Amino acid sequence: MKSIAFFDFDGTITTQDSYKLFLLHCFGWKAVLGKATKILPILFSYAFKFCDNETAKQSITSTFFKGMTEEKFDDLCKSFVEQKLESIVRPNAIEKIKWHQSLGHKVYIVSASFTKYLKLFADKYDIQVLGTELEVVDGKLTGWFASRNCWGPEKIERINKAVPDLDTYDDIYGYGDSKGDKIMLEICTHQGYRVF
């Protein structure tokens, strides 16, 4: 029998949103609050559902990371994973990942968070990553996504590209915690919603 498992990251493997923690790690509270004032209209629009998740996140990402060198971004991702990320990881989620692996199941993280730091985390546990990529031109971040934000319907698109033979799997496990994960869970034969 072939089995595969898809895990959301933020709020599922972790106890909180890693993107917010990453911004604080990169810039500190003072700079984050200062820059946030520039995008208050977008933040309010998202809070009151006048703009979607991808539009809001793209605006925030551009405001904070546009012009940063790829080398500096890579260093920040590395220090974030080493110093902060493990502190918000749920031990029981890691136990479930290891359980799947012990049975020979393929395991993927499918997340809207940045692939750069997700992969550094996932490599420690031998997990595949489908995340949001950032565009780099001439060694600098443009502030734009190089891929669609891996949230909601985009999660299905990524899964289908990464696992084109998904229909040949006998058991498909899915774990998530938000409305952005529900469409992913719908394709799973075993659905774990807020189980950790």
Image (spheres, rainbow, N blue to C red):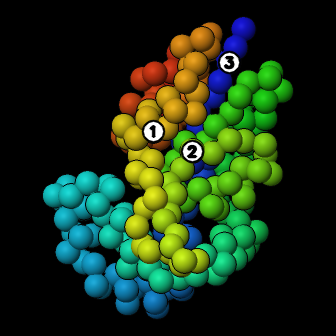
Report the front residue among 164 and 110.
164
Left or right of residue 84: residue 143: left
Q: Are marks 1 and 2 in contact (CB under 8 Å)?
A: yes
Residue 175 lies, with reference to residue 74, above or below; the image says above
Left or right of residue 190: residue 31: left
Q: Amino acid at mark 3?
A: Ser
Q: Label 2, on which residue?
A: 130
Q: Residue furthest front?
A: 138
Tell me the quarter of the image containing the N terminus. Answer: top right
Residue drawn at (79%, 45%) of the image: 125
Quarter-of-image position of residue 69 = bottom right
Residue 175 in picture, x, y percent from top left: 55, 33
Q: Amino acid at mark 1?
A: Lys
Q: Label 3, on which residue?
A: 3
Residue 174 in picture, x, y percent from top left: 55, 29
Q: Amino acid at mark 2?
A: Leu
Alpha carbons under labels 1 and 3: distance apart: 18 Å
Q: Residue furthest right?
A: 102
Q: Which mark is residue 145?
A: none
